[in-house]
Image: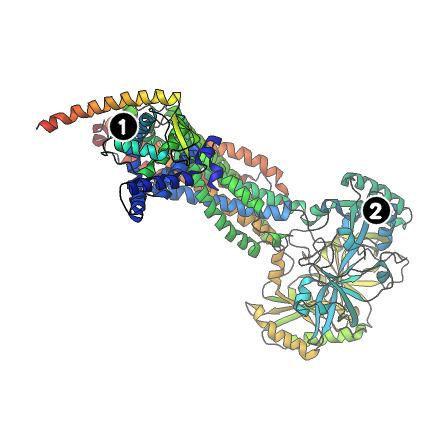
Amino acid sequence: MSTKRGRDRIELLQGTLDLLILRTLRLGPAHGHAIAKAIEYGSDSVLQVEQGSLYPALHRLIKRGWITFDDGTSENKRRAKFYYLTAKGRRQLHIETSKWDKLARAIGRILRPAIQE
Amino acid sequence: MRGRLLGSRRGRRALDGLDQDIRDHIERETQDNIERGMTPEEARRRAMLAFGSVALAKEDARRVWVWAWLDQARQDLRYAARTLRRSRTFVTAAAATLALAIAANTTMFSVLNAVLLRPLPYRTPEQLAMLWTEDPTQNLREGRSALWNVEQWRSQSQSFADMAVFDAVSLTLTGTEGAEQIVGARISPNLLPLIGVQPALGRGFSIEEAEQRQRLALISHRFWQARFGGSNDAIGATIVLNGLPSQIIGVLPADFQIATLDADVWEPQMMSTGVRGGDTWFVIGRLRPNVTFDHAQAEMAAVARRVNDQLPAAERNRGISVVPLSLQMVGSQSRLGLWMLGGAVLCVFLIAAANVASLSLARSVVRAREMAVRAALGASAGRIVRQLLTEGILLATVSGLIGTLLAFVGIRLIRAFGPANLPRLNEVSLDLRVLGCAVAISLLAGILVGLAPAITTLRRDLRLSGEEGGRSVAGGAATRRLRRALVVAEFALAIILLVGAGLLVRSWWSVKSIDPGFRPERVLVMELSSPTTFSVAAQRTDLYHRVLEQIQAVPRVESAGIIGDLFIGNTREQVLTVEGDGGTVSERLRFRRDEVSADFFKTLGTPLLRGRFFSIGDGPDAPRVAIINDAMARRSWPGRDPVGRRFKLGPRDSDRPWYTVVGVVADMRRQGLEREPVPQIFESLAQNPPRSVDLFIRTSTEDPLTMAGALRAAVRRVEKHAPIYGVATLEEQLGTYLTQRRFQTSLLTGFSLVALLMAAVGICGLIQYSVATRTHEIGLRMAVGAQASDILRMIIGEGLMLSVTGLAIGLVGAWWLGRAGSSLLFGVSATDPLTFMTVSLLLTAVAVAACYFPARRATTVDPIVALRVT
């Protein structure tokens, strides 16, 4: 039962998390931990990413060809996978961003009267 | 394992080092936490917490790369299981139908496989053949051969690499517990190498040993287990056969038999004796590589002509027939019967599949809405077809599994109750080939079942239109047509099976109503051997006389008689010299000669047509007398009274004694009910007592077997060392000739009734559905004045039209197939009008009955209700 609810949450998060990853990588290549931290700090710690769910999301994006990766060395001389956007990913980010804006506006329009009440 | 399902190289590269990536990630988080001032333990705990389940992360990352279709297939499967669980009635009906059909098919094809298809257990068995002596002028086919002839064939033939001989013998085995009779065989020393069988233990005979007539024996695996407990001590041990010691030199493999000969003890027989000997041997040969049976047959015909030149004039018409061993073991009659049953069971399967497909079609119309919704939600046509196929295959798999389990049971039943005289039936088992066949059949069924609704769904173009979404999904004309065609096909197949079954049942009645020439009820049969020391005829005469006396003194025994051997296999032709009106005539004749006691005919209830039975006066010193059967009388003294006439065995100048005919008895069918009786001659037992005899005891009890103990004791009081064996009722023995026919008849009848039932269910379902979709129309008709009887007639008429169409097609098929299988019939023609008419009426009646119930429901339609719901 609990795993089912967990999966549902990933389903819910899926699109959003993907978008956040793409957005983060627009600033340049990063390894997994750095992406997680960037999302956390970038949202003033409002968005707490369950770090484990980052990896399936990364693989999903690789599979779709939106990001790719290289083996590199991190700041503290550790070997790590560095993920970066592909051209396709850049286009996708644009599409996803405008979709998100539309969604946010639409939901906002629906919610606002309720708030006024 | 999972790695293999991963799709691309990219995926493998991405997943490579995933563990390390995650470990590094947590390590970095821990470091961050420490820098924020946590203790290392706390830092690590928090890092783990923030990451969540490592296993789930890895699992989900991997799953990204798993073949997409596999994932979809899993979805399909789960969805299919859920759908099927919801429609329990449909699943139960469909799975039960399919499972039964699959079980019947698997069982039947296991039998076909073992009996007809699987190679014989010898080395390159396709090169082995039986060779028979034949003589067209004597109506002799598949006759045995003399050693001298075989020696000639062997030296003159180029086609055969080698030939060997064998024959069954009855042996008296004397052990610590007394004497008993066992089945033995004599084989030439080259027989085992020829068929390519090695003794499991010890060795075979050498040619020298056979020529020196050494008393050696090979024993069967069964005998070895029973007598020696499977011990190696058996080799070199001595057993006493027919009063003389023989040394065991080898044990044959388990279940070994030559053709259909299954013996416990095998003795050596030399091939070249220098004398011609009797025509008593079975001959088996191995063809040289690349020689065909046709070629061998042609060559042996030429060999036969050369050999004939050296034979006496009366035997110069002899030929040799070469029969492939596999054909010999399972004759063309049995083969035809089995293929017929295989075809029948396949028909049952087709009907079952048609029914299930028809059910699915009906469902597909109901589900049109569901499909349309799915299509509207973005499912592609291919996806929907796949979904339906998955449902069909899942259903078939479940049915296949149940069917296979049922087939296990079926095979056990067939092995237990199948005809014992069908060779190799004991080898029937569920083997992989058959299992594969069942799986293929199940999948085929699944595809059929799935495809039918898929096609109609696609035809409907997956529109979610108002009129289709509502009540009036009258199920497109295509669906209706398809279902009607299926019902017609079902009826056509059912009538073919019914006609076949009807003809076999009539044949069975014909066979059963044949007068065997004796009354088998309440008669017990025992075989009795005289002790091996009774070498003088008078000793045996005395023994049999006293045994009969003792037996007749047992309570509830009405009478008792003796004959050398009641049931006969192949008869041999011999020269007979007969005194007729125009002097004495010698001719070769197929006839049977036996010795009978005075009360034999009385005991069996065989009527005397002329003259008298034997009496106590027909002793060893009295003039030789004979009783003949009606067939013999008609053959040798046509239109004359044979009583008082004389005949003798052998040619005119032979020194055999003359026999005087004293009586004529009715014909007895001693080769099975279906064979015409051959001419038979009976001698007085007292004048020529054989070494072993059949004892017949007519009792006054319904179950004569209960008297076996008392009768055995009676014989033992006379002579302790005379073995008794083969105790059975005469009805039982007569019945063994019918087992194959009973097997065929009962199975085909069963199959055809199942087919009929399924066809009835099929048409009932169709009509019911048709009524349900025509409620509105029926209501309208009733509103404008149609009576209930009009509606009834209309609905039943619809069903009747379908069944009669099927009937017409099926009758043509039955007529055509019946002629091909006419050799399986007895006393009835393949186009027997009575059978055709009866089964046609039966089928029509069943169709009407099947349509009646849904039609009745149609008449209860309330026009107001039907019209309001528009």
Toward the viewer: B736 or B198?
B198
Q: Quadrant of residue B857?
A: top left
- The label shown at residue B624 is none
- Residue type at mark 1 is Gly
If the image is split into quadrants, where does the C terminus of chain B sit? Answer: top left
Image position of B829 (left or right of A96): right
Q: In the rendering, at what x and y percent does residue B425 appear?
A: 61, 52
Q: Is residue B737 visible?
A: yes
Q: In the rendering, at what x and y percent does residue B423 appear?
A: 65, 52
Name the residue carrying label 2: B318
Image position of B303 (left or right of B344): right
| Disc on the earlier residue, 1 or 2 | 2
Q: In the rendering, at what x and y percent does residue B183 appear?
A: 71, 63
Q: Which residue shows up at 33% across the image and 32% down it?
A: A35
Q: Secondary structure at mark 2?
A: loop
Toward the viewer: A21 or B276?
A21
Q: Secondary structure at mark 1?
A: loop
Count residues near mark 1 (Cα–Cα under 10 Å), then give few for <14, some for 14-19, many for 20+.
few
Name the residue carrying label 1: B470
Please report, as a chain letter, where disc 2 is located.
B
Toward the viewer: B197 or B16?
B16
Q: Quadrant of residue B706?
A: bottom right
Count residues near mark 2 (Cα–Cα under 10 Å), then give few for <14, some for 14-19, many for 20+.
many
Q: Which residue shows up at 86% across the image and 41% down it?
A: B302
Toward the viewer: B175 or B753?
B175
Is circle 1 on the same chain as circle 2? yes
Image position of B602 (left or right of B293): left
Q: Which residue shows up at 75% across the image and 74% down it?
A: B531
Image position of B831 (left or right of B404): right
B139 shown above or below B626:
above
Mark-to-mark CA distance, 1 and 2: 83 Å
- Residue type at mark 2 is Arg
